[in-house]
Amino acid sequence: MTRKVYVFDTTLRDGEQTPGVSLSIDDKFEIAKALDALGVDIIEAGFPAASEGEFTAVKKIANAGLKAKVAALARLNKKDIDTTLSTGIKHIHVFIATSDIHLQYKLKKTRDEVLQIIKENIQYLKDKGVEIEYSAEDATRTEKDFLLKAFRVAAESGASTLDIADTVGIASPSLMKELVTMVKKEIPDVMVSVHVHNDLGLATANTLAAIEAGAEQFHGTVNGIGERAGNASIEEVVVGLKVLYGIETGINFQKIYETSKLVEKLTGVRIAKNKPIVGENAFGHESGIHTHGILNNPRTYEPISPEMVGRKRWFMAGKLSGSHGIAAQLNEMGIIVNDEQLTEIVKRVKSLGDAGKQVTDADLYAIAMSVTGSSPQKYLSLKGIVSVTGMNISPTTSIRMSFKEKDLESSSTGIGPVDASLKAIQKALEGVLKVNLIEYSIDAITGGSDSLAQVSVKVEDEEGHIASSTATGPDIVMTSVEAMIDGINKLLLKRVK
Ligand code: KIV
Ligand code: ZN
């Protein structure tokens, strides 16, 4: 029988504890729906006793009829517990620390007092019709006999899940294994869970080690966001479980990337380019040796296929590129070149790379156009635009574009005229192409209020194709629109192979 591991998602609680992150009720609700579609088993929607907004958000999520169980966090006191229960959640996650350092400097309680708090409050919860999960905060720095005592009291009082929290991310994989093995042996008939932080970069390894030792559930967040260096990344753990151990979770791998992007957008926490699974470079290749290998058999340099997690492989041209990779990149753009043209293109790419320049696909496209003497194919072009901004009105843009001879029109508001304009472009294309703007940057390249602006954009379609483009001009709205339309044209070239 295949083993299933349960995914307890804490993006909306521990993830929101990331310094600088504060989600509105609507943002939390949107993320909760995405987590439900992703297939997590439990959504920890927040900490209702912390604020009115948290209470309202948890209540809204708990009553939204999601497939996932909705949980919320509470300290072990009756006030927190009552507030939390009144949201309508089905799973309560209660915690109190067990390590001596927390008892002495934070709680100022003896071990016996802590055991009493666990007993009283979990017994109080026992007949309230909710599942009870108890986390021993700072469990990995707790003296083992006392940790077992605390867990025993929690289980005897009514907790059905015991969670070993590596609160400061200090555990090693072998310690995690030892603790899980100990709890499973000494306290049978409860679910054992782990909650791991990433302070030493070990969150995924520690979570996998705990599951190897028999833990049935893990806590994690999308993109690994969370306090300090974050929590275990759900995407890393579930992919690790599948490819290394053949262990299933309820996660729909095809939804991993879009969920990651949504969390990035709403929390404002940027995903590092080299982050496993969801980072921009996770399936990107530049060196000629790797690209050649990949083109012969992707398994040569890819541990998992990008499609497995809803992504696409991509190649970047640079000084380390070879002709195989560049020909494949051009081919993806729909550009066919002869051997002589390819040699010239590779030469120009390498000399740009040697000069320390990053060769984006926009640059490669321009080089190929110049070498082949072709003019760039444009499916989408601007026919008219009005953008207004001011005080006491939302900046608004109305746009008309031509797409393959058809006129597309739309209007949108935004937080500024650039935002309104780029949203109007995306809106006009609805039904034709779903475009996500995944990167936008603007630099002034001369001084003064008449500076030239250089705008770079990176756009992505729903099939995972990515294209970047740069435009330079004196008007930031028009330059942004130009870069966006150019990027979309490059995306369209990739689609119409
Ligand atoms: O890191 C931690 O210990 C927690 C607890 C509330 C489980 O987030
Ligand atoms: Zn935590």
Image (tube, rainbow, N blue to C red):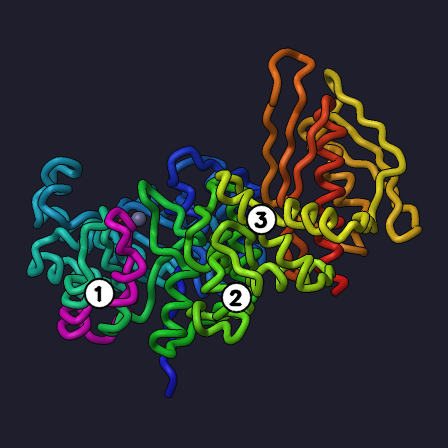
Which residue matches tag 1? 155
Q: Amino acid at mark 2?
A: Pro
Task: Establish if 399 lies above or below 459.
Answer: above
Measured from the top left, where is residue 284 in percent x and y?
Answer: 51, 57
Which residue reaches farthest front?
Answer: 340
Which residue matches tag 2? 306
Task: Establish if 56 lies above or below 32.
Answer: above
**Residue sitting at x 70%, y 46%:** 366
Which residue matches tag 3? 349
Q: Secondary structure at mark 3?
A: helix
Measured from the top left, where is residue 354 in percent x and y?
Answer: 49, 43
The quarter of the picture where the N terminus appears is bottom left
Q: Amino acid at mark 1?
A: Ala
The quarter of the picture where the C terminus appears is bottom right
Which label sits in the foreground, 2 or 1? 2
Q: Is mark 2 within 8 Å of ligand 2?
A: no
Sequence-wise, the earlier of marks 2 and 1 is 1
**Does residue 220 appear anywhere in the picture?**
yes
Sequence-wise, the earlier of marks 1 and 3 is 1
Distance CA(mark 1)–CA(mark 3): 64 Å
